[in-house]
């Protein structure tokens, strides 16, 4: 393969992968708007003392992806301090979301508002095996 053709191939592949990232985030936003926004709000700020904020949360941009996968699948009502605050509401479970949908919504909340963290892959979601 000529050098020029090789460069086109590389640029093409970069183009494809960045388009996929954008599509994942668009899909994640849709899921967020239909399932999460009602509690966590459009700005990710949550509701003080009631619904935890996702914007600026150290857990949301942290490395414990398994914990968040479990929270999304099973819901969450642990009443442990999250960044020093407690939230009285109970998060509802989402047992019907596919692994791909969970990866997209997690990628979205990790890369929205002031959050900037790595995208979440389907393989990372699959690592979290939740007991029925
Ligand atoms: C019925 C309201 C409600 C809905 C709907 C909801 N959540 Fe939550 N979420 C909460 C509450 C309340 C907490 C904190 C619970 C606690 O502290 O016991 C929480 C906690 C979390 C956390 C942990 C935050 C941290 O700092 O550790 C994540 C991540 C999360 N939610 C993501 C989502 C996603 C993604 C969706 C949509 C698929 C969603 N939530 C839908 C109410 C909700």
Image (tube, grey):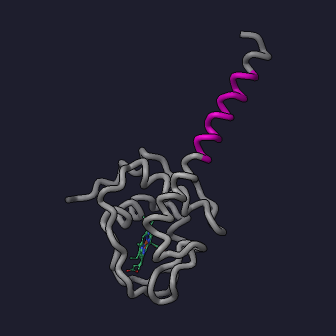
The percent coordinates of residue 52 (x first, y second) are 48, 79
Q: Is residue 120 magenta?
A: no
Q: Quadrant of residue 97?
A: bottom left
Quadrant containing ligand 1 reads bottom left
Task: Give me the residue at 37% from left, 75% from top.
Answer: 91
Q: Is residue 13 magenta?
A: yes
Task: Give me the residue at 56% from left, 61% from top.
Answer: 110
The percent coordinates of residue 15 (x first, y second) are 68, 34
- Residue 74 is left or right of residue 107, and the answer is left
Task: Give me the residue at 43% from left, 46% from top.
Answer: 122
Q: Is residue 82 above or below residue 60?
A: below
The percent coordinates of residue 14 (x first, y second) are 67, 34
Residue lying furthest left:
132
Q: Is residue 114 above or below residue 45?
A: above
Q: Quadrant of residue 10?
A: top right
- Tell me the chief SS of the magenta region: helix
**In-front residue for pair 105/2:** 105
The percent coordinates of residue 34 (x first, y second) are 46, 64
Q: Which residues are magenta?
A: 7-22
On the rendered image, what quadrant is the N terminus found in? top right
Task: Give me the residue at 61% from left, 37% from top.
Answer: 17
Residue lying furthest right:
4
- Residue 5 is left or right of residue 61, and the answer is right
């Amino acid at each position: 393969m000529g050098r020029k053709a090789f460069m086109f191939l590389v640029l093409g592949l970069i183009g494809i992968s960045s388009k996929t990232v954008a599509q994942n985030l668009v899909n994640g936003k849709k899921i967020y708007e239909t399932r999460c926004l009602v509690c966590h709000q459009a700005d990710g700020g949550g509701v003080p003392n009631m619904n935890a904020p996702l914007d600026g949360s150290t857990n949301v941009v942290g490395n414990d992806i398994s914990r968040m996968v479990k929270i999304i699948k099973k819901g969450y009502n642990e009443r442990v301090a999250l960044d020093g605050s407690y939230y009285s509401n109970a998060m509802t479970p989402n047992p019907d979301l596919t692994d791909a949908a969970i990866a997209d919504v997690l990628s979205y909340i990790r890369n929205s508002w002031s959050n900037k963290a790595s995208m979440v892959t389907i393989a990372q979601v699959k690592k979290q095996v939740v007991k029925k």
